[in-house]
Image: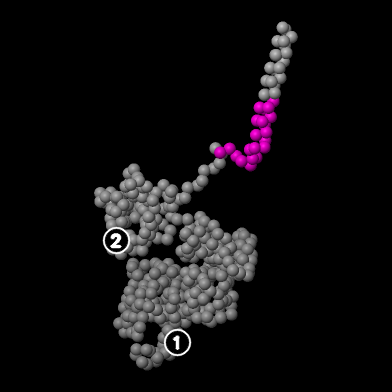
Amino acid sequence: MNKKKSLILSLVTIVVAAIFITFYYNSNTFTEYDLPKDVEAIDTLPAPEPELLYGIPVDSFEVVTDEVKKNQFLADILLKYGINYQMIDRLAKSSKPIFDVRKLKRGNRYTIFNTKDSLKKAAYFVYEIDNTDYVCYDFRDSLSIAKGQKVIERRMKHRKGVITSSLWNAMVDNNINVQLALPLSDIFAWTIDFFGIQKGDTFNVLYDELYVDGESIGVGTVYAVNFLHHGVMYDAYRFSQDSTVTYFDAEGKSLKKAFLKAPLKYSRISSRFSRSRLHPVLRYRRPHLGVDYAAPRGTPVHSIGDGLIIKKGYQARGGGKYLKIKHNSVYTTTYMHLHNFAKGMVVGKRVKQGQLIGFVGATGLATGPHLDFRVFMNGKAMDPLKLKAPPVAPVKKENLASFKMDVDSLRQLLNTPIAGNDTVKIEPLS
């Protein structure tokens, strides 16, 4: 009997052991072979990033985008999206410190974020003030208003051009943003007469173009320029010194002089300095002691340097409305035939270089709108086109090593051949 019990116990033990070994083998086989090693646990996988528009999750709303129509007011837009007059009035009053809703512009884009329920009521209203700035109105709990800015992307570009008729046309001919003409004329305002650029002049420039939503919105920083003018090469390299950013030539001399090269932009010289010129109105010869810049009525006129207004008036049979500015003990300038004076221009007022002082006109004896610009050295009239002003301070000795490194890097980029896509870098504008 005892032998029988022992036999049964042995058999049970064997069976239990076999079951345990089978379960253990199958368990390890599943872990090692059936579960791919590169599969992570589900709860560790990152959640997908939501699609955002103006910082708002698009998937949570029904989005409607449109443009402001002619004679359309804010109420015309919001009433059909469930926002009542009371809320619109509150919005208009609360928004004034941030954006005056009476200034909605025809053609500007706006976006409505509607709830996905049957009411389809506006939860957000976003109006684009310009290419970069927008204002967001949140109607969800209680009205809140916030101003935002789109991400501005900058792309460094390398461009070359040859002048065939004008700087502006050279930009168009070489597929360059025409807005680049403005900073170029500012950079070389003290060294190149842009009214006198000629066919065959060339430029080679490294600059940032700014983009929003993949579309160009203008020109940003200009880093370096080589400009060949009348056979002379002019270089400009951007450099920061004493917390001030300006442009220097390759030797570290400042391009900024004591005077601007001309008192207005984008025009032509209609009459030069002469000791004997046939007057277009009086029809007899007499000295013309200045330079006439033909320009449309209302063209801004700027002071060519820091100075003090010493005369302001009207010459009925001469210069019409005019201003006279004393810059230092040596130089004085006069601006004649003005249509009007800039606000605040009075005798005794100090003006800065480049400050707006008036607008081109045809007052006095004039056949058409133009600026008669005159320069006096020690009280004697001189040809404004021959004015040579002393330069501003160069790069300091302690900064020269850093400046030279910057110049070498920029030169390398300027000397790199342009082929196809000329974008050097793409990054958000900080």
Which residue does the image show at 38% across and 74% down from the upper left? 299
Task: Tell me: residue 401, above or below residue 228.
Answer: above
Q: Which mark is residue 274?
A: 1
Q: Is residue 421 left or right of residue 91?
A: right
Give the structural element (helix, strand or loop) at label 2: loop
Circle 1: element type? strand
Q: Residues within 10 Å of mark 2 (few under 14, many from 20)?
A: few
Q: Which residues are magenta?
A: 21-42
Residue 169 image position (x, y, % from top left): 49, 77
**Residue at the spot 52% in from the left edge and 56% down from the top edge:** 428
Tag in front: 2 or 1: 2
Q: Could you say which is closer to the camera, residue 153 or residue 281?
A: 153
Residue that label 2 marks: 72
The amino acid type found where label 2 is placed reads Gln
Q: Quadrant of residue 329?
A: bottom left
**Quadrant where the image shows the N terminus:** top right
Residue at 39% in and 49% down: 61
